[in-house]
Amino acid sequence: MVGESSIEKVRQANDIVDIIGEYFPLQKAGANYKALCPFHQEKTPSFVVSPDKQLFHCFGCGESGNLYNFVMKMEGLDFPEALRRLAERVNINISDTGDKHYRRNKQIKESILALNSRAAKFYNKVLFSSSGEKALDYLKGRGLDKEIIETFSLGYAPGGNFLTKHALDNGVSTEELLQSGLSDTGRSGDLRDKFAERIIFPIHDERGQIRGFGGRVMDPSRQPKYLNTAQTPVFEKKQIIYGLYQGKETIREKKRIILLEGYMDVIAAHKSGIKEAVAALGTAITQDHIYKIKHWVDDVVLALDCDDSGFQAAEKGVDLLADSQISSRVCILPEGTDPEDIISKDPEEFFAYIENAHPGMHWRIQRSIEKAGGKDTPEKKAAAVKDLVTVLKKIKNAVKREEIRKAIAEELDISEKAVMQVMGNARGGLSLFKERLELDKLSREEKIYRELLHIALKYDDLKEKLKKALEYDIKNIYVDLLRNYILESGYDIQKAFSAGGESKKILSKLSIMPLNNEDPEEYLDELINTLERLTLEKRYQHLSHEIRKLIGENNPLQLKEKNREFKKIARTLKGCKDEVKADIF
């Protein structure tokens, strides 16, 4: 692992305002900077960057962190990769810092990518050999010519463990074959080809690197029909968009993608000139996919198979896209057909379906009504609204959410108020109420320590008074963070930040939020006094319980001692000896 000193050296050499400013413009707002959040859709800036603390926090969606977290989130990198990128930016060489873990990971990834490239060439060569004659005839029968086959680097995996044997004979290790997913072990434990007697679809990322493979049988009686590479250090199914590499120029030009369901659908579309066609491996679009394409497209057309799995995938896609800046449309194809059938027969007919695709949320509302069995009874309307509320709750943009709420109310012939009532506490997702609602959920002690932590993050010159708050026997996340920040991190926010998770979010938010009090020292005294009073109240309640118990046990000596302490606390709480009427017996 890279030493803490190197990590800190790189962090100090980079300024978070400069880093974030390279991605989008920041506007000065007092001591901080603001912008529209890159991680969710909004019209009013709630993304705040603190040059003093070197942190960012979005008060809309809650994303927060330091410059490493920002680069990791924006670029989809792990920590070592983000560290390397930031080190290179300021010409700091960390190659000799002993980061064996990073170097090992990098070597493994490079090895797998190189092996995948060799495997793709091997499969492609087999396809055009006598061993692949049957597979080539099959592809030609599906309307594919040599040009489109080469565009997508299609191939054929023969039986007999040819790839495994060939790789081992050429110096590839067993470990490399297993890590890449090209080989696995059967029940006997022997190494064998993962893909055998299947047409091979190399899966490229947007840069053209082959991350994995899909294999399709030609014999419909063999199962599974499709077999994909399992997760590897370079392949994660939810992040890959098939066809994005081959169609990226058209996609950038048209600012849209047509999301289909399978490899053959995409290849048939590209052959017919529909080069913005892509597929998500596993049918449903994911947040990772949206993040990948959000700078490329304005419109996503979901043209999935007309069956239950296709409809479910379309629902998920519309729901996710509803909370993005990308519009969605749903293309309904005739029942019993799929895109490849229509494209192969008549590409113009498919284009007509695409151009007449329904706006995503309009289709989604109709789909919910259909699932509810109609809208002719209050019960069916309620079921439809309940289903649609799950979408509404995910939409952070207030204007968009209101428009959809109106559309739901209008389509179901009910009031918007009724929709809001079904939403229940969904308003809690609104950024205007979010902070208030979060505070309302906290206990009195949590609120006090949250404010004490807030003061500590803003005014480290009050450290001696703040230490007094750690003398009480109280346990919650804010106490832990305050103790860590004062005693363990030495008032260094970056050290305290290493806790991660919820702690990271709390520290980022409070570091950036203004303290709504003109005199922090006076406010601190009030909080300590309130804390002392709460502690006394807890002791008062505990003594009350003990005294009642002692009365029943007829223990006059202990009773006298407890009652004396009880009265003393009562006088302190009441503030006047003459008015104390604290005896409970």
Image: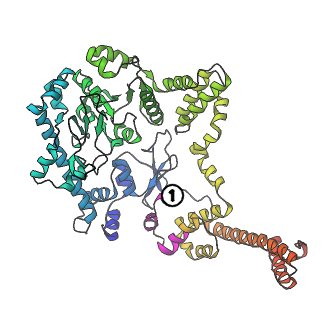
Residue 370 at x, y percent in the picture: 54, 22
Residue 578 in picture, x, y percent from top left: 90, 75
Instruction: Check the image and report above or below for 287 versus 553.
Output: above
In magenta, the rendered stretch is 482-504
Q: Is residue 153 visible?
A: no
- Residue corresponding to mark 1: 502
Give the quadrant of the C terminus.
bottom right
* Front-lying residue, 506 or 491: 506
Q: Is residue 490 inside the magenta stretch?
A: yes
Most extreme residue toward the bottom is 557
Mark 1, secondary structure of its residue: helix
- Outermost residue, front direction? 188
Name which residue lies at 83% across and 71% down: 574
Q: Residue type at mark 1: give it.
A: Glu
Task: Please provide percent x and percent y for residue 199.
Answer: 21, 33
Left or right of 89, for residue 406: right
Q: Residue at x 28, y 32 (%)?
A: 222
Q: Is residue 116 above or below residue 325?
A: below
Quarter assignment of residue 93: bottom left
